[in-house]
Amino acid sequence: MNLTPRLKQILLIMLEEGQVIPVKELALRIGVSKRTVQRELEYIGNSLKAYHITFESKTGTGVWLSGSDEDKKQLLEELRGEDNYDVSNREERRKRLILEILKDKGLKKLFYYSSQFQVSEATISSDLEAIEGWLNAQQLTIRRKPGSGIEISGTEESYRRAIRTFIEENIDTQMIRESYEVGESRKEINAAYGGMNQILKDDVLKRVADCIDGMSDKRVLTLTESSYVGLVLHISIAMSRILKNEIIEQKENLSRELQEDDDYALAKKIVQKLEEEFETEIPEIETTYICLHIKGAKHQNIEWNGQKIIEVERKELLDLINEMINAFDSENAFAIKQDDEFIQGLLAHLQPTFVRLLHDMKISNPVLADIKKNYPEIFEKSKRAAAVLEKWIGKPVPETEVGFLTIHFGAAQVRMEGKKENIRQVSVGIICASGIGISRLMLSKLDKIFKERIRMETYGQKDITPYVASKVDFFISSIAIRQLDADVLQVNPLLDSDDIEKIRQKIFHYERIPKKDHEETRFTMELEQVNVLAMQIKIILRYMEVFKVSNDISFEELVVAISEKMSPYRDRQVMIQEDIEEREKLGSQIFAEFGFALLHTRTKGVIRPSFSVCTTKDMKAFNNTYFKGINVVLVMLLPVDENVKVNSEILGYISSMLIEDYDFLTTITGGDKEEIQSALSRHLRKFFNQYLNKLQ
């Protein structure tokens, strides 16, 4: 089937649902934007003709597939039978290559891998060079044999370490998530999908999962989802090798050390079930490796002799934790020791940590670099706690493990500080040139990150009066602000990770200092504000315009067309043109990723606030490359008058709805004036009610 991987995902969801599904829900389930899904759906019609299935959609309702049950079933079976990964995705392909090598280390020609991954032998050769460093870090090496192919050499212990490391590093990736889905039992492996099951072949994954699911032991039932999946994948890879009669090295000393362990008895039961299921003899060393995996796994509840470990007087562990706390922070040790959440969490964390350290089992920590960068002081203090653990267990503690200790100790420190301090909501002002464009996009992003910790308002550059500055803790600005007696943080309009961290630090600071004192707005002023707001909303709705232009129009020509639509007077038209063009120079207002342009500015060319919609004559995309393939231009103009603040708030709210409400944007793109006016009215009514609630 000539479909993109994403389109296959969309079709799978639609076929499995078998009913109308909103585009927003599709986007959420796939993990992309609604606009991305919309683009994919533009090409779905022709692909379905061969199956006698048609794609249907209705604005405000959703999308669905029409056709006979038999045709839908045939398409669903074909999609499920395919391995839906994108061969052009180099990173994904190389991860799959590592997995292919781990499940079958025998001699293979390059052609074998090139046919597996549908790429050239030269590409596979390049991929092998790229993954060689990862394999070497696991003490595995690629041996090239001219004329024969390549094979991987290394001890069985190195192989198992590599398998575990691979699973730890990729447990949250799409490749592994595709291998299972959570059912009512939490452990329902779905063999019908692609992903890992396609790579492992012969439904090994499903059969292993069935064996594990049959175990009623608490140590299996309490495994976290990621640990459960890791166990199933580890065993499945091993079984793939055993079924090919690949010899697995014995390590007698290791087996003898664990044979008296309770987890070894559980591993033995799992092996017996596997031998019955696959009708083959499994080497004894496999029992040992399964035992180690169980011991190193994370559990939802850690138990000891049938009780939660926090309820047990486990003197050795508690003594160890007390020593670690003293080493971490001797001054605040007493307060940390009273944190039951911390003690229970660290107890649960230490049990699998001991197993990993004693048996040199590596663990991946994908956030280690961020921890070291953002929390250097806590990380250094956690090193002192790790030194106590290192002395106690007699094994070195790597930085990856120190990183996890930092998370536990850091959380305890934050809780401790929170009890000492009075935390309040922070007032933040977001500034851009007009107060209705970039600032609204920034507001939406910050709202998702910081939620109730902050209260935000957007402002144009000229809106910052002494009164405004007095009631805002600090400002975030996408443009340079001069001669403003206030705390201003200048950021990139797209808010990169460094900007977010700077904002986080500002919020942390202001949360802990008393709120600024300022006079309450008088009741009469509130009434005046409400009256002005109602009047301006009425004006925007009354004078809203929808007009069409040529598909081939240039940006400059469009600006002229807008100015002529907005004012009959030549001098005012020139003002509008100049102000729109000047605003565009500050930063492009063409948002290709959302499919629209938002031309907004403050200008003396208009005497009232206006919102207008401009489309092409055939309702398709603008042809001029400046517009980057968009098919609608939204125009928002603010007059230069005493109502600039309230006008900015109204138009700014409309801007945010374009991003947050997909159906609103779809209605606008449709170009029907009455429908647009109706949708706009609904949103502005909601805005008006929110404004009134703020005054209460």
Image (spheres, helix red, strand yellow):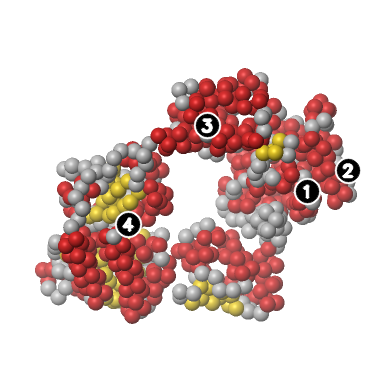
Circle nearer the N terminus (2, 1): 1
Question: Which amino acid does the dot numbered 2 rest on?
Answer: Glu
Taking the spot 44% from the left edge, 28% from the top edge, the residue there is 377
Q: Earlier in the sequence, mark 2 or mark 4?
A: 2
> Badge 1 is on which residue?
216
- Measured in 3D between alpha carbons, the distance from the residue under mark 2 to the one under mark 4, in whole angstroms, is 64 Å
| Amino acid bearing label 4 | Arg
**Mark 1 residue type:** Ser
Amino acid on which the number 3 mark rests in the picture: Gln
Other residues around mark 1 within 10 Å, as few (<14) / some (14–19) / many (≥20):
few
Q: Position of residue 4 (x, y in %)?
A: 57, 62
Q: Which residue is mark 4?
A: 440
Q: Kindly identify the residue that appears in the image at 41 percent across and 66 percent down.
A: 661
- Please, which residue is most extreme toward the left here? 571
Location of residue 470 in the rendering, given as x and y in whole percent from the top left corner: 20, 46
Residue underneath mark 3: 338
The residue labelled by disc 2 is: 281
> How much space separates mark 3 and mark 2, taking CA atoms?
52 Å
